[in-house]
Image: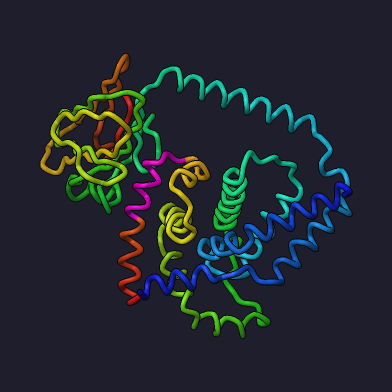
Amino acid sequence: MSKADSKKAKLERAYDLYADRLYRIALTQLGNDADAQDAVHDVFTKFFTTDIVFLNNEHERAWFIRVLLNRCRDMIRRGKLRTHTDIDDAHDIAAEEKDDHSELIAAVHSLPDKYRTVIILHYLEDIAVEEIAAALSLSVSAVKMRLMRGREMLKTELERNNL
Amino acid sequence: MQKSNALGEYRKIQAPQQLRERVFASCEELSKSNGNITKLNITKICSAAACFVAVFALVLTLALSGAPKLSHDGENIRSQTAVSGIGETAAFSARTTLPSGIEFELDISSPSVIRVSGGTLYLIDSETYETIASGFAVYAKEDALLIWDIADETFDELTLSITSSGSEKYFSLALDESGTLCISKK
């Protein structure tokens, strides 16, 4: 197998493993499909152009999550998020707004950044507190504190929406 | 039930097919246009090596010192840090009333005694969120959450000390010029 084929095979494996999860996280972080796709696209192109050796699966997963969150944060900070909808996408929006999951995403998206991130990773993506702490460079107790506060905020938001 | 339905619906969300095509097309382009993307860059290696040495030195220093660490909202308290009570902002709590609970995360490598000059300390188990001890001084055997209740205090400055084997750290809690409640390491 040539080096190019090997890189492509690595990309395919990584994409199949992480794309759905990264897309969901990006969607809750950024609030719209087009920006979420941009962020996930950038993560995989970075993976493709970086010769990184992962120690194990947890290390690999943490890398993808950390790079994605940094990319989302960067997009938010630079004000690069879309505030309008392309005409071609307009027909999808009405359908999306009726989706059951859109209310949960909206509730999670309404949380302050630091609570939103840990809530998504732990409760929606089932990632262990220790792994989140490593990915976000926080102490385990800080992650737990954010989870406790974020959970209460999310509960209030979901009750308000009768979810 | 509704919540678990919403969670189930959330987990059904999949990346769109066009995203896959876009990613693979971009990577194909990158591999064609940039055949030497893996070529080593001496500047990058030097920078990475310098960073590694700096991080290693820092980690080694922290590990050897084993000093207790106090954080507020995930931020290690070194210089002056604005603090707020549960569910409040720092400016709001200082303008109206002193907060009924300021939360800290305590990271210790050996059993420690935490004392305050005023108010009440609550030592909270970070796993179960149960109160382990309370008072003006508490004994912590391991990492925990601390809640410092100063609601009934009138003060210019309060102090918190952490004493563990071989080291003692002091922190000072006071209002700054703008009326924001801040804690700083002495």
User: Left or right: A162 with respect to A64?
Assistant: left
Residue A39 visible in the displayed image:
no
- Dividing the picture into quarters, in which one does residue A92 lie? bottom right
Q: Residue A88 at what x, y percent from top left? A: 68, 82
Q: Residue B123 appears at what percent x and percent y?
A: 22, 37
Q: Quadrant of the C terminus of chain B?
A: top left
Q: Position of residue B85 (x, y in %)?
A: 25, 47
Q: Quadrant of the N terminus of chain B?
A: bottom left
Does the segment drawn in magenta span residue A44? no
| Vertical arrangement, residue B165 with respect to residue B143, above or below | above
Q: Residue A147 magenta-drawn? A: yes
How many dots with numbers? 0
Which residue is situated farthest in the front direction here?
Answer: A1
Q: Residue at x 71, y 41 (%)?
A: A52
B115 with respect to B66 (left or right): left
- A157 relative to B33 in the view: left or right: left
What segment is highlighted magenta in the picture? A138-149
Magenta residues, dominant SS class: helix
Q: Which of the 4 image quarters holds residue B155? A: top left
Q: Position of residue A29 (x, y in %)?
A: 52, 61
Q: Is residue B140 above or below residue A64?
A: above
Question: Considering depth in this image, is A74 or A49 the residue closer to the camera?
Answer: A49
What scheme was used to colour the molecule? rainbow
The quarter of the picture where residue A155 lies is bottom left
Residue B89 shown left or right of residue B97 in the figure? right
- Residue found at x 62% / y 42%: A56
Compared with residue A146, is residue B60 higher up or lower down, i.e. above or below? above
